[in-house]
Amino acid sequence: MQNFDVVVIGAGPGGYVAAIRCAQLGLSTACVESWLNEEGKPALGGTCLNVGCIPSKALLDSSHHFAHMKHEAIEHGITVTGVSIDVNRMITRKAKIVSMLTQGIAGLFRKNKVEWLQGHGRLLSANQIEITPLANAGTEKTIVSAKHIIIATGSVPAKIPPAHVDQDLIVDSTGALCFNQVPRTLGIIGAGVIGLELGSVWKRLGSEVVILEALEDFLAPVDRQIANEAWKTLQKQGLDIRLGAKVTGTGSNNQQVIVTYQDKEGKHQFNVDKLIVCVGRKPNTEGLGADECGLILDERGFIEVDEHCRTNLPNVYAIGDVVRGPMLAHKASEEGVAVAERIAGRTGHMNYAAIPWVIYTWPEIAWVGMTEQELKDAGINYRCGVFPFAASGRARAMGETGGGMVKILGDAKTDRILGVHVIGPNASELIAEAVLAMEFDGSTEDIARTIHAHPTLAEAMHEAALAVDGRPVHI
Ligand code: FAD
Ligand code: AMP
């Protein structure tokens, strides 16, 4: 039987990063992974690289170029005629990016001497894992032992009974990343992060998109001022988002999906060429052997962990989407690093109060820390500074006149930054400054006194910080 210091189950951004960090710290490490890619070959990278962050961003970028050439290039004096989209080429490009990056992880495993165990891992005890080989790789199960186990089995798309996913007419997020043509009409269930991103891709390429959202509030977890701005912009782009709309059933007719939903005005029905179900994700513990070895899950199926990602079993940790907290790749990775450090006897660091969120619509939406509503609900006195991109020279030069803002919330007494919210071009990159400032326990005055290059979008962050103290220069 092979014996390792650490065996990681799952090679998504949580698991593969944890495995590499363990190996860097001198621990003998293996990583069990059961993913088979579209060609039926074993692949590393998990949801993020194969069917999540990376392929969705590849399509968002392709569709952004298309929409820009079609509708915005003219503003710059550039006439582009005959703009068309070759969907198969776009999808092939996406597949190549995924393949290159997933192979890159295999290279990193070799470089760091992480052993890749291809198969499905099942816990036999707190230090033994049974591995079932992948399809076409034999039937003989093996058992490995480990001093420490890190579970990073991620999540899978949630399902709802009224919309059964067949990956043909009704697809989940994975199916929506490989349509072979632009659907003329597209329905989406769920106006969350994934629904809005996928809706944006296909809308830009020409689909008529209807998004149904059960909640009355648009982007409920997002700061209201930012969500309202996003609502206006996305409506202007033609995304037909219907709130308080609960899907009650689906059927099919002539290669179309019939969708029925209920809102406060009653029952409604419409037909679409494709329907994407994006109603969230659920933790993946299927076939993990949790029950048999007494691993405790919470009532929603997440593996229960303490603040150090320790499960109830000795020396067994769990990280990423399979445990509480935001389902984000960078959260999974940082938990992986923190756990690896702790196993190696070092101090693991994980600051849950400074995890950035991004929605890659255009304009992008990004935030870190508390919203204005959360501050009010918690009775925290705060000061707020807002700077609109309409007043940013760089945004104007870029032709980014679609509105948006940076909003900074600081403690009224101490000036400590409590939350930063951005809707605007490149918000995904701009938020990094705010995360760093919060990580350093910075104040809004710290950002206000930091010199920002001109002309940049980041100047909006500077001006918003100045605005907290009532001294913005350009508004
Ligand atoms: P996963 O990436 O889900 O990896 C888990 C791995 O474990 C899988 O490879 C699985 O095959 C393997 N596994 C499971 N059980 C076993 C077992 N018993 N034995 C062996 N292997 C097993 N997040 C962001 O931060 N930014 C984004 O832009 C973003 N975009 C997204 C877009 C889409 C369309 C989707 C679906 C998700 C997106 N996410 C994004 C979320 C992100 O993908 C997840 O938060 C992240 O992948 C979680 O990482 P993880 O390592 O916990 O799990
Ligand atoms: P996220 O959690 O960001 O992936 O978003 C999923 C979204 O789907 C949430 O906003 C949910 O409110 C929404 N949702 C879940 N079930 C339904 C349903 N039956 N009909 C419409 N929207 C739903």
Image (cartoon, helix red, strand yellow):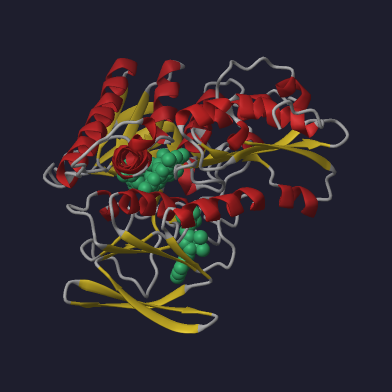
Is 469 rendered above or below residue 41? above
Q: Is residue 275 left or right of residue 146?
A: left
Seen as rendered, the residue at the extreme front is 77
Q: Position of residue 457 (x, y in %)?
A: 55, 27
- Give residue 386's quadrant in the image: top right
Q: Is residue 424 left or right of residue 452?
A: left
Q: Position of residue 248 (x, y in %)?
A: 41, 78
Is 374 rendered above or below residue 335? below
For the question of whether residue 121 can be seen, the reply is no
User: What residue lies at 54% left-to-right and 23% top-to-bottom?
Assistant: 341
User: What residue lies at 29% left-to-right and 42% top-to-bottom?
Assistant: 70
Seen as rendered, the residue at the extreme bottom is 266
- Give the quadrant of the C terminus: top right
Q: Quadrant of ligand 1?
A: top left
Towards the viewer: 209 or 198: 209
User: What residue lies at 40% left-to-right and 49% top-to-bottom?
Assistant: 197
User: What residue lies at 26% left-to-right and 43% top-to-bottom?
Assistant: 35
- Give the quadrant of the N terminus: top left
- Give residue 133's quadrant in the image: top left
- Give residue 370's quadrant in the image: top right
Q: Is residue 453 left or right of residue 255?
A: right
Towards the viewer: 208 or 342: 208
For the question of whether residue 441 can be seen, the reply is yes
Q: How many marks?
A: 0
Q: Position of residue 395 (x, y in %)?
A: 52, 30
Q: Position of residue 92 (x, y in %)?
A: 17, 39
Towards the viewer: 128 or 56: 56
